[in-house]
Image (cartoon, rainbow, N blue to C red):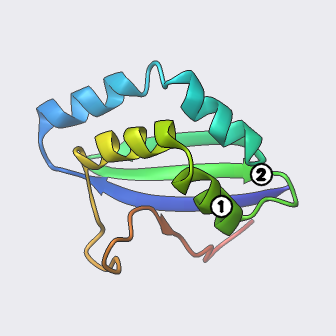
Amino acid sequence: MKRYCLAVDLKDNPELIREYEHLHEEVWPEILESIRSAGILDMQIYRTGNRLFMIMETADNFSMDAKAAADKNNPAVQHWEDLMWTFQQPLPWAAPGEKWILMDNIFQL
């Protein structure tokens, strides 16, 4: 099993943050299916302030590139991502067009 940790920011607007959280109470079935079919075994998103932190545990054969390619060809995922982007904003150090940024593991017990 592999673990990935990623971060992105939400727009610093309490109303938008509430709506974003509400949408995640009932994620669309097509989105859940795309996550599972990519080999993601568990996904959790945490928030502090307007910063989001995602933990993904995946099958050993999981590929970020394959997931990105599948997402690009999935209209439901594209619609969801466009909707989510109305709430999200890139981290200050993100490259142009980059959303969720893969975090580096700097300590492990």
Rendered location of residue 37, percent (x, y): 75, 40
Which quarter shows the N terminus?
bottom right
64 w.r.t. 19: above or below: below
Secondary element under disc 1, as helix, strand or loop, is strand
- Residue designated by label 1: 4
99 w.r.t. 51: above or below: below
Q: Quadrant of residue 64?
A: bottom right
Q: Which mark is residue 23?
A: none
**Quarter placement of the C terminus:** bottom right
Name the residue carrying label 2.
Answer: 58
Q: Which residue is drawn at the image coordinates 52% and 50% (left, top)?
A: 54
Q: Is residue 73 left or right of residue 65?
A: left
Q: Nearer the viewer, residue 76 or 91?
A: 76
Q: Is residue 31 above or below residue 47?
A: above
Q: Amino acid at mark 2?
A: Thr
At mark 2, the secondary structure is strand
The amino acid pointed to by label 1 is Tyr
- For the residues labelled 2 and 1, say whether their Cβ atoms are less than 8 Å apart: yes
Q: Please report whichever mark, 2 or 1, sits nearer to the chain's N-terminal start.
A: 1
